[in-house]
């Protein structure tokens, strides 16, 4: 049998919070793809609504673990990145892409920067600039509309199509594009534009973008054809299913998507 595809997931782990590595590992695994974690920051909870969270940056550990992997000759079929604790970590990740990627390695950058028309307060202009450089190494980026505008250097109220046209990456999926009662994914794969949408549910949940990008990553790597449109459709469907399950569990599940319910139903098989 052929070896499984292997993804290196470089994100934080928010111990309580249903985002980043806590969703990337199970979702990528559920697609039958091996998920290897490289934590950037370990936080007691995510930053979206819990008071007084504690955080530890893992920069030195990232360097040390990567040195070990280099010594044993590891390669990854996909490198999938998310939230970083510093510019230094982004610069280090550029080097990891170079060292652990091969010609066929798919680089997916989820450029976590902000939401709802604002940059997250923990990030500086220098951080945004570093994230722009990282996206230049990506095969695919999955920004939400706010992050796409920041990367493009355009005002938040710019038309999504104009923002999309400005992003100079081979494949782009802009998430969270609102259109008349629906929420869309405005995308460009190679030269081809594609937009799909699911019904809009008024429930703002932290980590929705992480669930989507992780499902996209897992489905893409599980598909020998690497069909991005199919992976996008499956991930959008999965995310909508997770939102519907989460609605049933309110108000206790305010802090993240109930993706476990969908995995239990075999949604990503
Ligand atoms: O969902 C993206 C994300 C991941 N991890 C941490 C975050 C955020 C977004 O705010 O704060 C710690």
Image: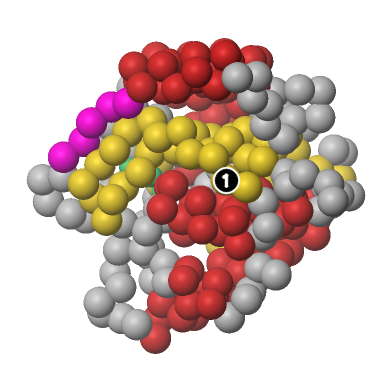
Q: Nearer the viewer, residue 189 or 82?
A: 82
> Mark 1 vs ligand 1: CB under 8 Å?
no
Ligand 1: image quarter: top left
Which quadrant holds residue 207? bottom left
Q: How many marks?
A: 1
Residue in view at x 83 percent, y 47 percent: 2
Which residue, given by chain and number where applicable, does mark 1 sit on? 35
Judged from the image, the secondary structure of the residue bearing numbered disc 1 is strand
Up/down of 182 relative to 63, above or below: below
Residue reaching furthest bottom? Answer: 248
Which quadrant holds residue 163? top right
Q: Is residue 15 visible?
A: yes
Residue 10: image location, x then y, percent: 49, 34
Up/down of 66 relative to 27, above or below: above
Which quadrant holds residue 235? bottom right
Give the magenta-colored segment's residue range: 54-58
* Membership of 206 in magenta stretch: no
């Amino acid at each position: 049998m052929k070896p499984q595809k292997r993804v290196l997931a470089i994100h934080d782990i928010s111990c309580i919070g249903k985002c980043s590595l806590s969703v990337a590992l199970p979702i990528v695994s559920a697609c039958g793809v091996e998920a290897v974690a490289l934590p950037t920051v370990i936080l007691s909870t995510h930053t979206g609504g819990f008071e007084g969270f504690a955080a530890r940056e893992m920069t030195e550990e990232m360097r040390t673990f990567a040195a070990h992997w280099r010594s044993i000759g590891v390669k990854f079929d996909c490198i999938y990145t998310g939230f970083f604790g510093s510019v230094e970590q982004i610069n280090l990740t550029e080097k990891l892409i170079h060292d652990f990627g091969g010609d066929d390695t798919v680089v997916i950058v989820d450029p976590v920067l902000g939401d709802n028309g604002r940059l997250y307060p923990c990030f500086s202009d220098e951080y945004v600039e570093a994230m722009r450089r990282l996206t230049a190494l990506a095969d695919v980026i999955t920004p939400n509309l706010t992050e796409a505008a920041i990367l493009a250097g355009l005002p938040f109220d710019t038309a999504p199509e104009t923002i999309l046209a400005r992003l100079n990456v081979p494949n782009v999926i802009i998430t969270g594009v609102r259109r008349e009662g629906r929420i869309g994914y405005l995308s460009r794969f190679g030269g081809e534009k594609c937009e799909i949408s699911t019904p809009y549910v008024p429930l703002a949940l932290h980590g929705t973008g992480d669930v989507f990008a992780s499902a996209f990553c897992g489905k893409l790597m599980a598909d020998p054809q690497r069909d991005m449109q199919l992976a996008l459709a499956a991930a959008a469907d999965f995310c909508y299913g997770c939102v519907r399950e989460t609605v049933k569990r309110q108000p206790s599940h305010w802090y993240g998507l109930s993706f476990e319910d969908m995995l239990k139903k075999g949604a990503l098989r």
